[in-house]
């Protein structure tokens, strides 16, 4: 496969996953703001920081406000990571690799772009925000279903999956980090009702509430929820699950192409950070430090995949 085609597939999947993840992050920010007594606009600063777009926001706005933060994340075309921007980039990459996609996948991607472009031409009010975020999740889920249901399990599929799971792991890591390191008011709040409510909100916003109750019952609290989102391989958004999928899909590419690339070794090293670990060890190490290490390794893997498979050629 041409490197340019592999790169188009990889980034199409990343941008689609980023759109859904940004929608989840917006929902998380909105719900967490309701748990604060002051409800200050400044609470949206950590959300922008988590999304990696705070610096860009500050170049346009003098202060952080809820309405501007939501608009920046949702539809501002000056923000290359806004939902509106990444859906367009996903569609542009899909068009670039159109011949590698099934009709069902192309139709789902193109349909997502057309529907969301129409919805996001105007500012979205707080009352309409939940419905718009639901539409984002619905449309990206349709694309994912088309990929799973119509694509051959070959190198094309593997590059799509690599993009999906790198972006998903990065997002879950960032949401965990913003909760534990940025949003928590003081060390005295650990284990408090506020702490537990915020962990519950994160669980629901990641779409993990049902799976958590099925496997963990009514138990709640930082340790159980963090264990589920980091180490439980049955959970398709856990860091462990995502890292294992990176190992598997890079292994399939190695088999197809007859050589194992350096990115495969990096993915294996990342997976070993989860395999056989206990959540107590991670908390002792420091959750923030652990998550930052994982995010750094994910960045290295992504960059190495681009080099290994010559995305720029």
Image (tube, grey):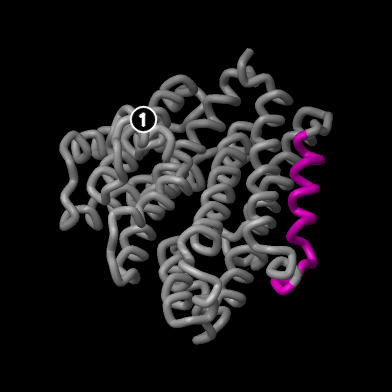
Q: Residue furthest top?
A: 313
Q: In the rendering, at what x and y percent does residue 67 appear?
A: 23, 48
- Whether residue 97 appears in magenta in the rendering, the answer is no
The residue nearer to you, when weighing 90 against 184, is 184
Q: In the rendering, at what x and y percent does residue 49 appear?
A: 46, 46
Q: Give the left or right position of residue 38, taking residue 165 as reference.
A: left
**Label 1 secondary element:** helix
Q: In the rendering, at what x and y percent does residue 24 appear?
A: 39, 55
Determine the residue positioned at 80% across, 48% down: 269
Please, is residue 182 above or below residue 74 in the view?
below
Mark 1 crowdedness (10 Å alpha carbons): few <14, some 14-19, many ≥20: few
Q: Which residue is mark 1?
A: 59
Q: Give the left or right position of residue 254, taking residue 311 as reference.
A: right
Main secondary structure along the magenta-highlighted residues: helix
Residues drawn in magenta? 263-280
Please, is residue 244 above or below residue 81 in the view?
below
Q: Residue furthest bottom?
A: 218
Determine the residue positioned at 69% across, 57% down: 290
The residue nearer to you, when weighing 135 against 280, is 280
Determine the residue positioned at 55% across, 60% down: 181
* Residue 12 in sight: yes
- The count of marks equals 1
Determine the residue positioned at 74% across, 60% down: 274
The residue nearer to you, when weighing 195 against 139, is 195
Q: Quadrant of the N terminus?
A: top right
The quarter of the picture where residue 233 lies is: bottom right
Q: Give the left or right position of residue 182, taking residue 134 as reference.
A: right
Q: Quadrant of the C terminus?
A: top right
* Residue 146 in sight: no
Q: In the rendering, at what x and y percent does residue 271 appear?
A: 75, 53
């Amino acid at each position: 496969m041409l490197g340019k085609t592999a790169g188009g597939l990889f980034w199409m999947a990343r941008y689609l996953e980023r759109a859904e993840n940004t929608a989840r992050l917006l929902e998380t920010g909105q719900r967490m703001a309701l748990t604060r007594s002051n409800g200050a606009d400044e609470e949206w600063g950590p959300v922008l920081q988590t999304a990696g777009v705070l610096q860009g926001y500050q170049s346009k706005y003098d202060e952080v406000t809820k309405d501007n933060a939501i608009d920046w994340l949702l539809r501002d075309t000056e923000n290359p990571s806004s939902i509106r921007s990444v859906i367009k980039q996903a569609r542009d990459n899909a068009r670039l690799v159109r011949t590698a996609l099934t009709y069902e996948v192309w139709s789902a991607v193109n349909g997502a772009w057309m529907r969301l472009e129409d919805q996001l031409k105007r500012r979205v009010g707080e009352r309409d925000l939940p419905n718009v975020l639901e539409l984002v999740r619905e449309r990206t889920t349709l694309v994912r279903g088309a990929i799973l249901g119509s694509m051959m399990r070959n190198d094309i599929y593997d590059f799509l999956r690599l993009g999906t799971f790198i972006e998903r792991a990065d997002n879950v890591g960032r949401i965990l980090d913003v909760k534990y390191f940025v949003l928590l008011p003081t060390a005295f709040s650990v284990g408090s009702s506020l702490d537990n409510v915020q962990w519950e909100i994160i669980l629901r916003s990641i779409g993990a509430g049902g799976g958590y109750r099925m496997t963990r019952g009514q138990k709640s609290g930082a340790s159980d929820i963090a264990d589920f989102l980091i180490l439980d391989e049955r959970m398709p958004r856990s860091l462990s699950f995502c890292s294992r999928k990176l190992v598997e899909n890079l292994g399939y590419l190695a088999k197809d192409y007859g050589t194992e690339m350096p990115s495969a070794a990096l993915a294996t090293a990342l997976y070993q950070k989860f395999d056989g670990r206990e959540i107590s060890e991670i908390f002792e190490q420091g959750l923030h430090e652990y998550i930052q290490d994982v995010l750094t390794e994910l960045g290295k893997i992504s960059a190495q995949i681009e080099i290994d498979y010559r995305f720029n050629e």
